[in-house]
Image (tube, rainbow, N blue to C red):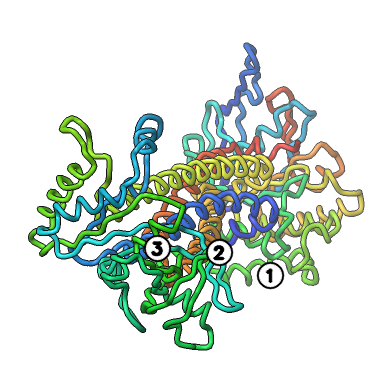
Amino acid sequence: MENEAVITMKSLCKFYEMGDQVVHALDAINLDFERNDYAAIMGPSGSGKSTLMNIIGCLDTPTSGSYELNHQSVAEMDDDELARIRNKEIGFVFQTFNLLPRLNCLRNVELPLIYAGVPPEERLQRAEEALIKVGLKERMTHKPAELSGGQIQRVAIARALINKPSIILADEPTGNLDTATSHDIMDIFGALSNAGNTIILITHEEDIARYTRRIIRLRDGKIESDNRQ
Amino acid sequence: MLLRETIIQAISSLAVNKLRSWLTIMGVAVGVFSIIAVMTALDAVDKSVESGLTSLGANTFQIQKNPATVFGSGHSRNLLANRKDITYQQALLFKKNMQSQARTIGFIIISPANQAKYANLSTNPDVTLTGGDENFSLANGFTVARGRNIAENDIRYARNTAVLGSEVAEKLFPSGENPQNRFIKVNGEVYNVVGVFEKKGAAFGQSQDNFVLIPITRYLDHINEKSSLSITIEALSRKQYQLAIDQAIGAMRLARGLSIKEKNDFEIRTNESLIDSFRDIKIAIGTGAFIISFMALLTAGVGIMNIMLVSVTERTREIGIRKSIGAPRRTILQQFLLESFFLSLVGGVIGILAGTTAGNVVAWKFNLPPIFPWIWITVSMVVCSGIGMAFGLFPAWKAANLDPVEALRPK
């Protein structure tokens, strides 16, 4: 059970054509993530970490190679199947938060449940629970503009958690936050990991990466190192 | 269930850009308004015309110089303009030739816009002075309410007798005083009132009772304003109606002295021909209104598409967010389609309400009961919804097929 793979990537490649040049954003990546992994993907800009995250998050598909998420082969899925996988299996936390500014916290958090077809009463109840879990009981009916950066990111984490995804995928989750708030957010991720969630972070900050138990370094579309600590 | 959520999302998105949404809605509303208003008004006028134009009695037709309505231009118009007036002599000749084939033959000559006076009271200068004979009332469906009709002797001796239309009588004798044997003045000429006609009501929004009838001979002797006579003929029976028309054409050609080669230089008017000629106008106006409305709706549709494309561009990030948390293409498509659908639907409803109101103001002016053109309302709703969907489809499709990675990329 401990070593069951949630994500398996085999010789995964992603090429972009830029004019007459072919850019190898990801070049033959072999990578597994196990259940309850808590990993950081690091690397300089242009190393391919955003591309890797987009593929792990099913926002994009690889040019070649295989990608299995929970034993489902994602590489050949069409747009709507990918949307369903994103909805059920993945919780996104973005650097720029990506909440809908017109909706209050509860409405933002329940959004994935709408697309999952959950009835309204249950949606609201689960959204409340998720917001309580990230410590925002008092701010549920506020809109994102009325919250601080740290609070907004907590709302985003609550939204990522709401559909009980297989993995939580965080792209520079502390990139727009000050140091103290960053550590608060990382404490939340630590708690989520302890609760058994699988978490993959993308960051270029060493002290943020140190919160995780595994650091994967990318360079020029290849894995440079993969260390567990 | 998801549809309900999508509808809520669509409406709240529209509510964010209120001014923009309303402007787009107004575009649709104007198009629908023009077609509904014109069609309602036409329907109203149509009803009025059919009751008004059947004012000729049963089995009755008229001979006049010109048709009721003139279409076309240039040569055909010039031909009509060159027609000679129908004179009293021609009319008498016609009557002589036609007498045996008709139950009654009446003559009318009309001078519009006269002022009638009695004591210190006077009417507006919009009274029709009608020169007629004893058959006027029969042919035009008037009955005498008080006193007597014009008599044969009034005609023979060109007496200055007059029978009043009920509206003129009300104006000049407001206290209900009996107008009989009172002397009124019309344009300076004095007439002895011998009777008053029963009220007939309005047609085309105009009173039919605002006239003074005097003997045609008196008219021809004393009124300088000479215009063409019209002749009203009542056939012997329904069976002989068409035959009577044919005979009347022959008799009139003879009276006008036309050679075989010449065409008729007069017109036969029947209830049917009047209604038909009005139909022509109705179709012309209706087609015009339809084309203009269609153009307006097309423009409105382009406006909807434009605004939806702007909306998709502005909300790229929102679309990206929704897609990243699992919104399928179909839902995004629905959301944007619903937005354009609502824009055109609300525009359609406003246009219908305003158009029906405007059309019914016309109906009210014509003293007609309110009209709801259900057919046009239905057509408008269908066309509107169709336009909303058709012009919203491309922007919605564009939104649904956005690449989530591109959509989420910070700008």
At x 42%, y 50%, the residue is B226
Looking at the rendered structure, which numbered label has been put on residue B125? 2
Task: Identify the mark nearer the N-term, 2 or 3.
Answer: 2
- Direction from residue B153 to residue A86 in the image, left or right: right
Instruction: Give the crowd class for mark 2: few <14, some 14-19, many >=20 residues within 10 Å.
Output: few
Determine whether B321 is above or below A114 in the image.
above
Q: What chain letter is assigned to the residue under label 2? A: B
Looking at the rendered structure, which numbered label has been put on residue B17? none
At x 60%, y 40%, the residue is B306
Nearer to us: label 3 or label 1? 3
Q: Amino acid at mark 3?
A: Thr
Give the spatial CA distance, label 2 vs label 1.
81 Å
Determine whether A12 is above or below A194 in the image.
above
Q: Nearer the viewer, residue B90 or B360?
A: B90
Residue B130 point in image, percent of width and height: 40, 63
Q: Secondary structure at mark 2?
A: loop
Label 2 in the same subunit as label 3: yes
Q: What chain letter is assigned to the residue under label 3? A: B
Image quadrant holding the C terminus of chain B, namely top right
Whether pointer 2 and pointer 1 mark residues with C-beta atoms closer than 8 Å, the reply is no
Q: Amino acid at mark 2?
A: Pro
Find disc 3 in the rendering and name its residue. B130
Quarter holding residue B261: top left
Q: What chain letter is assigned to the residue under label 1? A: A
